[in-house]
Amino acid sequence: MKRKSEQKVSLDRLGGTPVLRELMAKAELHRQAEYQVLAALPKGLASGTRFVSLKEGELVLSAESAGKASQIRFRQHEIMEKVREHEAFQFVWKLKVKVSPPRFQEKPTFRKEPLSKENARLLKEEAGHTKDKKLREVLEKLASHVRT
């Protein structure tokens, strides 16, 4: 059995293999095609949209939301007209849009706002009018969380 250090294959050693060169060439073609397609999209629709494929005249895009996908579908004739200006896309006759939401979304950090002096005053006032001892204590404790 080989050691882990021997199992690792560096990109430099693979650089000479024809399979990797072919994959790199395909990736570059895809990148260029995506650039051309995204340039043809109206402003505001390009962000969150990706070029998926072009097979037999069918251009496939993916959008991050259903709303954006609907907007692309609504303007598909305008988009296809602009895309056809490029030689590689001259035979595009159909546009298909798939919805592919991002895998991970950052959750907004929740930040507690400190209590304003006015709200603290109102809580203390309400605590003074409350007959329930436990509720009064809770309201007074809340009132003590005033922003300074």
Image (cartoon, rainbow, N blue to C red):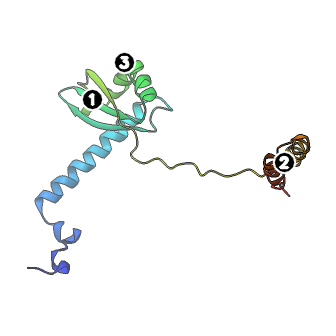
Q: Nearer the viewer, residue 26 or 6?
A: 6
Quarter of the view holding residue 16: bottom left
Residues at discs 1 and 3 in contact (Cβ within 8 Å): no
| CA gap, disc 2 and disc 3 | 54 Å
**Residue farthest along the front direction in this orientation:** 132
Q: Which residue is mark 1?
A: 59
Dot 3 amino acid type: His
Instruction: Determine the secondary structure under disc 3.
Output: helix
Q: What is the quadrant of the N terminus in the image?
A: bottom left
Dot 1 amino acid type: Leu
| CA gap, disc 1 and disc 3 | 12 Å
| CA gap, disc 2 and disc 1 | 56 Å
Task: Tell me, for residue 33, which label it has, or none.
Answer: none
Q: Which residue is mark 2?
A: 116
**Apparent side of residue 111 relative to residue 71 in the rendered image (left or right):** right
Q: Position of residue 78 (x, y in %)?
A: 40, 20
Residue depicted at 88% across the width and 42% down the height: 122
Q: Where is 122 relative to 85, above or below?
A: below
Q: Position of residue 22 (x, y in %)?
A: 16, 53
**Residue farthest along the left direction in this orientation:** 1
Whichever of callouts 2 and 3 sits on the residue coming sooner in the sequence is 3
Dot 2 amino acid type: Ser
Q: Which tag is nearer the camera, tag 2 or tag 1?
A: 2
Instruction: Determine the secondary structure under disc 1.
Output: strand
Instruction: Determine the secondary structure under disc 2.
Output: loop
Q: Which residue is mark 3?
A: 77
